[in-house]
């Protein structure tokens, strides 16, 4: 009886080991659906990247001078957030998700990277649009953070 149970356990263990060797899935570590147990890539990888908007003191000072309290950001013609630009600034590029910045996650689908257009609406304290920027392109990379420094 013990030999039969041991033999069955050995057979089941061998079958499981052999079947996992050929497991297919996403094998790109930069993908958001990476499968560390997969041995063969099946083309199912999907990607997301982050975009960060930030600014230095001269931009903040210009916003204050022109009574710009906030900047609304549009990525791919979709509103993604408003930044209170007159409140603070950075001396160098902050990390993604730094307090006070606007960081947006962009779904790239099966593309490892892509170029996307964004534009800005400069708003006064009453949320009236003072000026709208032309569209600007930004490169977004899967599992990465692309930064754009706002400047006049």
Image (cartoon, rainbow, N blue to C red):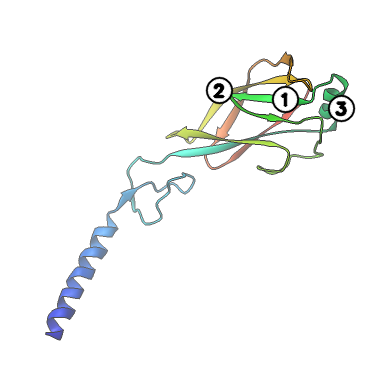
Residue drawn at x 29%, y 53% as measured from the top left: 23
For residue 24, side relative to residue 138 (left or right):
left
Give the mark nearest the N terminus, 3 or 2. Answer: 3
- Choose the circle earlier in sequence order: 2 or 1: 1
Q: CA distance from mark 3 to mark 2?
A: 28 Å
Element under disc 2: loop
In the rendered image, the vertical position of residue 70 relative to residue 100, given as above or below: above
On the picture, is 43 further left or further right than 124? left
- Gap between marks 3 and 1, in whole Å? 14 Å
Disc 3 designates what residue?
Answer: 61
Crowd rating for badge 3 (residues with CA inside 10 Å; few <14, some 14–19, many 20+):
some
Query: Marks 2 and 1, Cα distance to the nearest angstrom?
Result: 16 Å
Q: Is residue 57 above or below residue 5?
A: above
Residue 120 at what x, y percent from top left?
A: 68, 21
For the residue labelled by badge 3, is the local secondary structure a helix, a strand or a loop?
helix
Left or right, residue 134 beside residue 39: right
- Dot 1, how many residues are within 10 Å of its Cα: few (below 14), some (14-19), or many (20+)? many
Q: Specify the quadrant that holds the C terminus.
A: top right
Q: Dot 2 corresponds to which residue?
A: 76
């Amino acid at each position: 009886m013990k030999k039969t149970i041991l033999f069955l356990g050995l057979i089941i263990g061998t079958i499981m080991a052999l079947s996992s060797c050929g497991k297919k899935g996403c094998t790109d570590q930069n993908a958001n659906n990476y499968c560390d147990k997969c041995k063969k890539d099946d083309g199912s990888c999907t990607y997301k990247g982050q975009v960060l908007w930030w600014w230095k003191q001269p931009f903040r000072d210009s916003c204050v001078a022109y009574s710009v309290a906030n900047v609304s950001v549009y990525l791919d013609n979709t509103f993604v957030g408003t930044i209170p630009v007159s409140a603070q600034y950075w001396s160098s590029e902050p990390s993604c998700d730094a307090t006070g910045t606007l960081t947006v996650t962009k779904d790239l689908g099966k593309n490892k990277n892509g170029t996307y257009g964004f534009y800005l609406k400069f708003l006064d304290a009453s949320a009236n649009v003072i000026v709208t920027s032309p569209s600007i392109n930004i490169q977004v990379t899967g599992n990465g953070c692309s930064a754009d420094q706002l400047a006049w």
